[in-house]
């Protein structure tokens, strides 16, 4: 049982001003796995005041001082990596191999990338007689979701620290454990008091207190579109910068020259990873209509081959995060059936033999792009396959979405694949796979307005100042 009842404010673990706790449920067992405190606006006020005080000194530290801190954080993170991974598994249900693998690897990658970017970052650049300075924006509110907790937390904290900002982290209520350990890591690494603060609690309380706070300069938010819209409205009165990383309904285009079996199987397996709870998941799989039979065979086999079970055991897929999320996904599966999509794998209910925990069957539909299951983010292991007539049709289907987060192209012809990548209205396109910590990550359209990861992630936390007349003449 984990009881994480204190907040981290001004370099110390402190009690909430008004004690109030909430249970944390293990999604694999439905048992209470621990408790957290739910903070109040008064706790946020304390944390913001600490961050404001610390900003005076942290914002003028040297690159070397900040790089030294990031190095110390990285060392401490590595020392506790296994513990972080186990916490991720317990809080949100990712299989241990994923929790202690890709989940923690992403956090580590963002810290080390920020460290490398920082070492060579030009905070001052002269243009003629004018000096253009990039200065830390100030006190930042970092609001994160539960689906890739270490990824989303570290991708904000590392560049915020590197640029000289101070911050208050508000972790997701459903997945609070790994953030608590991360706060311990930052403390043990020697983060100066007030530079990093953490208050746990409800989004509608702690998140709103941050978004509306007079003394918070910027909000970096990753989460759902409706909450992103609400935060933008809440932040408007104080004219804060708001960085939004929201949802997606990304298309994966398999070209006619590609192996249908390999690529459809890969895309199907990819969709089921992390129980489909990935913002950039390729949840619409576009295949040549003439080869739909081959694609159906490959997707069915791949989905049926995904093992589902106890995340501490040897299974490919664990539960989804909560009962509420399970019910939302079940409703979408029912909706797909009702609107006439063809169910080729999975379906309603839990996998056979599982009667505890929020486990969903890896599900694949064949449908069209007007169906609700192709338009809305389901955030579960549900894939929709759609046939396209030609490449123009594939691009039109892919772009016919309110979202614009990711896109995928699988094809032998690199020029054709590149051409599609140029035509997709999305913040990122992955051509035949690949992975790059330096590649900016963010969305077009309703997928958001920010860009995180690598050097671009620094921009979110920087103001630009022109000093005209820096040099004479
Ligand atoms: P969510 O929007 O419900 O919650 C995200 C965070 O916002 C949580 O910490 C929550 O407590 C807080 N929050 C809730 N209401 C708030 C309010 N009124 N004001 C301020 N904060 C508030 O999202 P979720 O269910 O935790 O995460 C899933 C969503 O996140 C999906 O839509 C997914 O696509 C998206 N996501 C996007 C990215 C990206 O980089 N674009 C990455 C991961 C997840």
Image: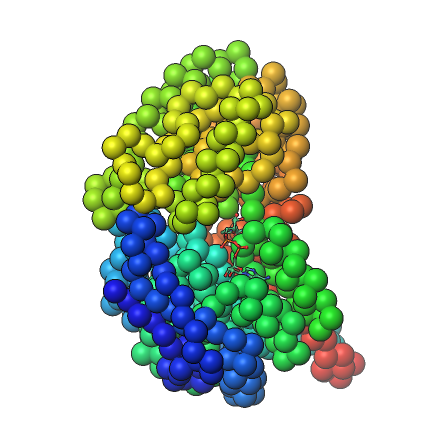
Q: Position of residue 275 (x, y in %)?
A: 39, 41
How many labels sit on residues? Answer: 0
Horizontal arrangement in the rendering, residue 297 relative to residue 377 (left or right): left
Residue 218, compared with residue 417, is above or below; it is below
| Image quadrant in which you'd find residue 449 | bottom right
Residue placed at 23% from the left, 48% from the top? 312
- The N terminus is located in which quarter? bottom left
Q: Nearer the viewer, residue 186 or 382?
A: 382
For the point 64% across and 62% down, which residue is it? Answer: 231
- Horizontal and vertical percent position of residue 455: 53, 61
- Figure check: 218 above or below 377: below
Q: Which residue is drawn at 55% across and 37% down?
A: 250
Query: Taking the image as drawn, is residue 455 in sight?
Result: no
| Residue at image point 57% right, 31% down | 374
Q: Which of the two residues, 405 or 16, is positioned nearer the viewer here?
A: 16
Q: Say which quarter of the image contains residue 392.
A: top right
Which quarter shows the C terminus? bottom right
Q: In the displayed orientation, state which residue is furthest to the left.
A: 313
94 vs 237, left or right, is: left
Q: Which residue is nearer to you in this view: 435 or 194?
A: 194
Can you see residue 446? yes
> Relative to 275, is 244 on the left or the right?
right
Residue 199, percent from left and from top: 46, 73
């Amino acid at each position: 049982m984990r009881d994480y009842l204190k907040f981290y404010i001004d370099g110390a673990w402190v009690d909430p001003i008004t004690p109030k706790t909430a249970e944390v449920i293990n999604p694999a067992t439905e048992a209470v796995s621990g408790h957290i405190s739910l903070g109040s606006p008064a706790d946020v006020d304390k944390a913001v005041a600490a961050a404001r005080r610390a900003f005076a000194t942290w914002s003028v530290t040297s690159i070397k001082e900040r790089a030294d801190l990031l190095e110390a954080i990285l060392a401490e993170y590595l020392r506790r990596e296994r513990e972080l991974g186990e916490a991720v598994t317990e809080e949100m249900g990712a299989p241990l191999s994923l929790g202690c693998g890709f989940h923690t690897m992403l956090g580590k990658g963002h810290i080390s990338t920020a460290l490398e970017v920082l070492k060579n970052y030009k905070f001052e650049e002269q243009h003629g007689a004018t000096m253009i300075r990039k200065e830390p924006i100030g006190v930042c509110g970092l609001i994160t979701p539960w689906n890739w907790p270490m990824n989303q937390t570290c991708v904000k904290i590392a560049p915020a620290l590197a640029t000289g900002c101070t911050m208050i982290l508000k972790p997701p209520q459903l997945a609070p454990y790994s953030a608590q350990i991360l706060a311990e890591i930052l403390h043990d690494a020697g983060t100066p008091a007030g530079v990093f603060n953490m208050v746990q609690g409800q989004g509608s309380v702690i998140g709103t207190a941050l978004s509306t706070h007079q003394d918070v300069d910027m909000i970096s938010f990753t989460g759902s579109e409706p909450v992103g819209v609400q935060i933008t409205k809440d932040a408007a009165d104080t004219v804060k910068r708001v960085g939004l990383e929201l949802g997606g309904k990304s298309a994966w285009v398999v070209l006619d020259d590609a192996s249908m079996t390999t690529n459809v199987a890969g895309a199907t397996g990819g969709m089921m990873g992390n129980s489909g709870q990935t913002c950039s998941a390729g949840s619409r799989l576009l295949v040549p209509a003439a080869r739909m039979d081959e694609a159906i065979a490959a997707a069915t086999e791949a989905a049926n081959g995904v093992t589902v079970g106890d995340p501490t055991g040897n299974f490919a897929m664990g539960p989804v995060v909560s009962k509420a999320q399970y019910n939302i996904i079940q409703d979408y599966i029912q909706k797909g059936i009702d609107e006439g999509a063809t169910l080729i794998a999975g379906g309603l209910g839990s996998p056979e033999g599982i009667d505890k925990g929020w486990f969903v069957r890896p599900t694949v539909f064949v449908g069209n792009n007007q169906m609700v299951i192709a338009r809305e983010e389901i955030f579960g292991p549900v894939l929709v396959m759609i046939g396209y007539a030609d490449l123009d049709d594939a691009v039109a289907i892919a772009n016919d979405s309110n979202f614009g987060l990711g896109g995928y192209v699988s094809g032998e012809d690199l020029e054709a694949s590149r051409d599609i990548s140029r035509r997709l209205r999305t913040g990122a396109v992955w051509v035949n796979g690949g992975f790059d910590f330096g590649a900016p990550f963010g969305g077009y359209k309703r997928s958001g307005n920010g860009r995180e990861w690598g050097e671009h992630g620094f921009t979110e936390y920087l103001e630009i100042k022109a000093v005209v007349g820096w040099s004479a003449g």
